[in-house]
């Protein structure tokens, strides 16, 4: 019994040991067996560990998570995530030592197909590509991922209590570690096919985590629906990505980046080739639109907020949704050959940035605002890569990962605080109700009791409908949440683009690219940035300022240190993250431009443009001022009209209802699809194929034929012969039977006749 | 001169025919027996007539055999008739038809 239980664990441990030992040995042989030669990336052989560590965490929690229990399952997962981060940091050191040379680390032959003649065929190796671009992504994924893992230990503790299934705590970390595995496969692979594996893997994890509380949500199925929506919307993008991959293989007979890009540099493209590249890049854009939530496939991301908040932070803000930007950046060689595609990319990004920002200003769900903000910021990044500003896009990706993860986690902290407040009231209400019969004033101050009771009654009215994510239920949290308030403010200011926070520098670089290359884009993006500043001001004011609008907000308590410490670290990163790539003229300028330049080629460094920076700052401050004027101390009560509603009138309804895009999709895609499906099922399949073709034609023909065989041939032919013979024998026998009636005189007569006949014969014939 | 043989044979044939007609037409088992005896005796008559004609004694001897057989037959047949009468209270041959096929 004991042995059987520990056997899987032992196997996992042995495998993990082997998986860790193999790269370490390779590293020891290459880097430290002899003196490490300058220019050799000594740490690159360690890169498989990047995946091995989260995989080990995943496997251990899969097999033993329930026994490990809370909080150790989370600590274990965080530990493995942290180890992966260490490996990523080592990669930076390795790259710096080796002159930023890209290294490919093959691990195993993955797909080997030989064609008949023996030349060509497919040979896709599983290999890791270590260059400055992939290492940047590794750092973001593992670094932010680790902080979110740690935060989740605290957050999920409360979440599983509130949702009433503490057994689900380890499962969350199983999914989270699996997500890290998939995401790291995505960013470390050296070919489109490897990337695609990770691409699908993160989609799966996203689905699993959005549906983490699959039995909850609207009609007890809302979360499952949201998960499915995300999966399906992603599939549309995946389809386009697969098409692009097939075309790439068709053109280049290889999936690896090096082969594809290397071949492109050595050949001159024909017109058809040029068109093919354009189509490939456009298909890649559709793939990126699916994963990175761009128009028209962004609709899944707001619904994805059904997942627990750390998931929103990790997957739907910081890492997975940036996969599309990474993919486009990785394919920069292809895009360089397709200027039309780049135009499309840029405009899709800018349109998304503005469109999502307008929706964000009218949302009331704290996470939904951030979700639309994420879509908008992803639009900025896509616009940047579309303008050829890959560094700006990646820079914004990194800073956005910091401050959006921070904002999501802080909103998680706010939600957590509100839930705690809500619970405190419910418990207090129970206590007063129970104790009310005996000694009324036994609990100390009667005043506090009365107020609690009052709140409890107010709360009981809408207890079943209390939504801890609705900003209208918040307000006045500034004094309640001493840590969260500051980190939230930093995140909001960074997102709004206020100098000297990180968001200012990264967004400014994108705006500068747009300003220099495409003035129309610049205007659109600047307006989007204004909206950004406005909705973040609105959110901060609605959440933290004014008076508490519900009892739960009045009783909110700050989250534990396991949640606030990662927040503080992220806040620091959000604050100073701009230093990664300061504009020219400042010390340490262009660090990231140079760093990524080793992979992306020489890149024009963004110089400081006083007009662009000044204008965006002034506009952001103006938007903040406008937001302050509108929302200072408002709304005063839960059901008060939104101040913006009074200002904008019916337009506000359109914004609040997301421009009715979901309804539009419902109308033009889902409903026709449903009709088509019903038509195919009811009419084509059932009526035509089943009722007519199968029942009438096939079955009817068969029955007719069978009847012919049975009645005509079998009964009429074979049986008739057999029965006829029998009938004949019986008829003959019946006639003969009449001769033997038993009358002796008949016998005697016959004998007489016989004798007469015999005698006649002898006498007459012979 | 003695009676010509063909007279005797003709008588024998008449007797035999009478016997046959009796067997075929009567229902009473005893009458049928009597008819059978008539047929046997007509045959005896024919035997004797031809024995005298051809001066051969084997015909005469054969008559004795026939008479013995007839006597035995009568003994068995009458016993059967008595038994049948006891069970069926009738000796009509039309009612003795249980062996019909």
Image (cartoon, coloured by chain):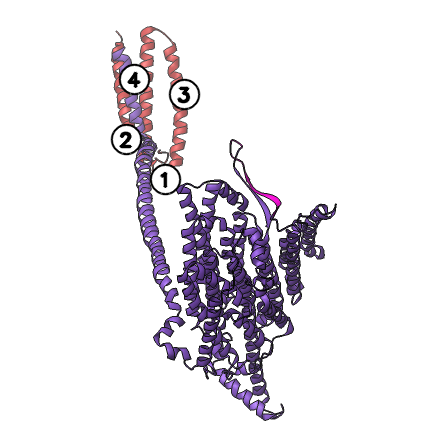
Chain colours: A purple, B red
Whichever of labels 1 and 3 marks the residue nearer the N terminus, that label is 3
Q: CA distance from mark 4 to mark 2?
A: 24 Å
Residue designated by label 1: B88
As for residue A112 lying within the magenta part, the answer is yes
Q: Residues within 10 Å of mark 1 (few under 14, many from 20)?
A: few
- Which chain letter matches label 3? B
Q: Nearer the viewer, mark 4 or mark 1?
A: 4
Q: Residue at x 46, y 73 (%)?
A: A534
Q: Secondary structure at mark 1?
A: helix
Magenta range: A103-118
Are labels 4 and 2 assigned to the same chain? Answer: no
Residue designated by label 4: A758
Q: Secondary structure at mark 3?
A: helix
Residue designated by label 2: B26
Q: Which mark is residue B68?
A: 3
In the shown orientation, is residue A514 left or right of residue B48? right
Q: CA distance from mark 1 to mark 3?
A: 30 Å
- Which chain letter matches label 2? B
């Amino acid at each position: 019994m004991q042995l059987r239980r520990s056997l899987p664990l032992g196997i996992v441990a042995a495998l993990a040991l082997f998986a860790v030992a193999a790269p370490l040995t390779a590293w020891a042989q290459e880097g430290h067996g002899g003196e490490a030669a300058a220019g050799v990336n000594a740490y690159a052989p360690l890169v498989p560990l990047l995946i091995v560590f989260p995989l080990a965490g995943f496997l251990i929690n899969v097999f033993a998570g329930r026994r490990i229990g809370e909080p150790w399952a989370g600590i274990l997962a965080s530990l493995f995530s942290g180890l992966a981060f260490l490996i990523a940091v080592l990669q930076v050191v390795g790259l710096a030592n080796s002159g930023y040379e890209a290294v490919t680390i093959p691990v195993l032959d993955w797909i080997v197909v030989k064609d008949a003649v023996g030349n060509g065929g497919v040979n896709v190796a599983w290999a890791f590509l270590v260059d400055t671009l992939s290492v940047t992504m590794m750092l973001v994924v593992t670094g932010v991922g680790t902080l979110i893992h740690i935060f989740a230990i605290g957050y999920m503790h409360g979440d599983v209590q509130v949702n009433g299934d503490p057994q689900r705590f380890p499962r969350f970390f199983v999914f989270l570690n699996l997500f890290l595995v998939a995401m790291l496969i995505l960013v470390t692979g050296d070919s489109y096919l490897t990337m695609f594996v990770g691409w699908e893997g993160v989609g799966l994890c996203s689905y699993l985590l959005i549906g983490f509380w699959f039995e909850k949500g609207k009609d007890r199925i809302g979360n499952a629906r949201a998960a499915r929506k995300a999966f399906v919307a992603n599939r549309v993008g995946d389809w386009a990505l697969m098409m692009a991959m097939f075309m790439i293989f068709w053109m280049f007979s290889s999936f690896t980046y090096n082969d594809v890009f290397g071949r492109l540099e050595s050949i001159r493209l024909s017109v058809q080739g040029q068109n093919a590249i354009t189509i490939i890049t456009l298909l890649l854009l559709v793939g990126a639109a699916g994963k990175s939530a761009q128009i028209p496939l962004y609709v899944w991301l707001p619904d994805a907020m059904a997942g627990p908040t750390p998931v929103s932070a990790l997957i739907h803000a910081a890492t997975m949704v940036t996969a599309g930007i990474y993919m486009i950046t990785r394919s920069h060689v292809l895009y360089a050959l397709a200027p039309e595609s780049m135009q499309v990319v840029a405009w899709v990004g800018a349109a998304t940035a503005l469109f999502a920002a307008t929706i964000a200003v009218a949302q009331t769900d704290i996470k939904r605002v951030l979700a639309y903000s994420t879509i908008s910021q992803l639009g900025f990044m896509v616009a940047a890569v579309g303008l050829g500003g890959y560094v700006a896009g990646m820079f914004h990706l990194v800073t956005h990962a910091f401050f959006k993860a921070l904002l999501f986690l802080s909103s998680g902290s706010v939600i957590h605080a509100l839930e705690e407040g809500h619970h405190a009231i419910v418990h207090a209400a129970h206590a007063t109700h129970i104790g009310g019969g005996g000694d009324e004033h036994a609990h100390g101050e009667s005043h506090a009791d009365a107020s609690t009771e009052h709140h409890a009654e107010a709360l009981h009215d809408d207890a079943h409908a209390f939504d801890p994510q609705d900003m209208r239920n918040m307000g006045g949290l500034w004094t309640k949440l001493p840590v969260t308030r500051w980190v939230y403010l930093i995140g909001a200011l960074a997102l709004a683009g206020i100098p000297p926070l990180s968001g200012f520098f990264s967004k400014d670089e994108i705006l500068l690219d747009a300003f220099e290359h495409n003035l129309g884009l610049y205007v659109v993006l600047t307006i989007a940035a204004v909206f950004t500043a406005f909705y973040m001001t609105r959110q901060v004011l609605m959440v933290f300022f004014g008076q508490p609008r519900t009892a739960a907000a009045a009783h909110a308590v700050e989250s534990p240190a396991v949640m606030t410490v990662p927040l503080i670290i992220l806040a620091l990163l959000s604050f100073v993250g701009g230093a990664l790539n300061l504009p020219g003229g400042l010390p340490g300028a262009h660090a990231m431009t140079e760093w990524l330049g080793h992979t992306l080629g020489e890149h024009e460094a963004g110089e400081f443009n006083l007009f662009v920076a000044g204008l965006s700052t002034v506009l952001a401050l103006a938007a903040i001022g406008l937001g302050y004027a509108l929302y200072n101390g408002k709304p005063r009560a839960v059901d008060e009209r939104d101040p913006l509603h009074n200002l904008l009138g019916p337009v506000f309804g359109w914004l609040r209802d997301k421009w009715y895009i979901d309804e539009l999709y419902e109308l033009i895609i889902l409903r026709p699809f449903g009709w088509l499906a019903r038509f195919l099922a009811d009419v084509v399949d059932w009526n035509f194929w089943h009722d007519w073709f199968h029942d009438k034609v096939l079955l009817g023909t068969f029955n007719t034929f069978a009847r012919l065989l049975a009645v005509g041939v079998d009964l009429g032919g074979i049986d008739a012969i057999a029965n006829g013979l029998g009938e004949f024998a019986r008829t003959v026998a019946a006639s003969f039977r009449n001769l033997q009636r038993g009358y002796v005189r008949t016998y005697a007569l016959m004998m007489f006749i016989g004798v007469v006949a015999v005698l006649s014969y002898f006498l007459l014939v012979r | 001169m003695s009676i010509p043989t063909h007279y005797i044979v003709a008588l024998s044939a008449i007797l035999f025919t009478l016997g046959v007609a009796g067997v075929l037409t009567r229902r009473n088992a005893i009458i049928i027996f009597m008819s059978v005896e008539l047929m046997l005796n007509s045959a005896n008559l024919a035997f004797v007539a031809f024995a005298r004609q051809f001066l051969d004694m084997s015909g005469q001897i054969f008559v004795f055999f026939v008479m013995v057989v007839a006597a035995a037959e009568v003994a068995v047949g009458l016993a059967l008739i008595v038994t049948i009468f006891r069970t069926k209270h009738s000796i009509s041959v039309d009612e003795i038809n249980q062996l019909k096929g």
